[in-house]
């Protein structure tokens, strides 16, 4: 299965800088003047799209095996979660919000 998850933003340059810090890399490619794409793994991508009308409505959660390592490395790049939760089944989630209010979560297995 492939994934191409889009997040609408109001300022593409600001979004590219923030998502690069969040995801730990510059965009993998820039298909046009209104999009930036990060390849997370084979056939799995997250992209930001300049769309001021819809900016702030994005909601994406990525499940990772090394939850602690990912959240720590994001913090080292200067991005802190706006919320951390542990669900009743032990699954953990760190939630981040970009400048438009889009929500990007990282979930991981119980500690």
Image (spheres, rainbow, N blue to C red):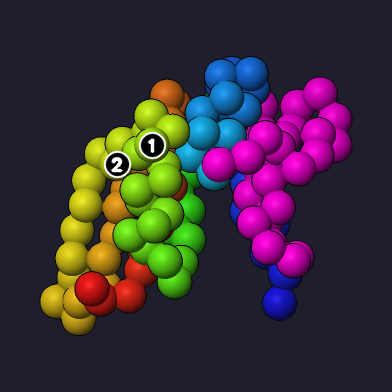
Q: Earlier in the sequence, mark 2 or mark 1?
A: 1
The reply to whether the magenta stretch includes residue 97 is no
Q: Quadrant of residue 65?
A: bottom left
Q: Residue at the location (81% across, 34% down)?
A: 30
Judging by the rendered image, the residue that carries numbered circle 2 is 81
**Is disc 1 placed on a helix, strand or loop?**
helix
Q: Quadrant of the N terminus?
A: bottom right
Drawn side of residue 103 relative to residue 58, left or right: left
| Position of residue 86 measured from the top left corner of the image (x, y, whole percent) | 18, 65
Please give left or right for residue 86 compared with residue 33 in the image.
left
Residue at point 44% right, 26% down?
Answer: 100
Question: Image quadrant of residue 20?
Answer: top right
As drawn, 67 above or below 65? above
Badge 2 crowding class, 10 Å Cα cut-off, few under 14, some 14 to 19, many 20 or more, is some
Depth check, front residue: 40 or 104? 40
Q: Could you say which quadrant of the image residue 24 lies in?
A: top right
Specify the farthest residue to the left: 88
Residue situated in front as seen by the camera: 71 or 31: 71
**Please, is residue 15 above or below residue 28 in the view?**
above
Q: Does residue 80 lie above or below 10 as drawn? A: below
Residue assigned mark 1: 76
What residue sits 71% from the left and 37% below the top? 27
Residue beneath the point at 19% across and 58% down: 85
The chief SS type of the magenta part is: strand
Start and end of the magenta stretch?
24-51
39 part of magenta stretch: yes
Left or right placement of residue 81 versus residue 48 in this view: left
């Amino acid at each position: 299965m492939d994934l191409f998850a889009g997040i609408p933003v109001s300022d593409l340059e600001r979004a590219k800088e923030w998502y690069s810090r969040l995801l730990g890399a510059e965009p993998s490619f820039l298909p046009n003047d209104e999009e930036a794409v990060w390849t997370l793994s084979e056939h799995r991508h997250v992209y930001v799209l300049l769309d001021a009308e819809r900016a702030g409505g994005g909601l994406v959660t990525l499940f990772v095996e090394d939850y602690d390592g990912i959240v720590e490395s994001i913090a080292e790049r200067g991005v802190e979660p706006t919320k951390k939760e542990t669900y009743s089944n032990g699954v953990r989630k760190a939630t981040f919000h970009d400048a438009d209010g889009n929500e990007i979560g990282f979930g991981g297995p119980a500690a």
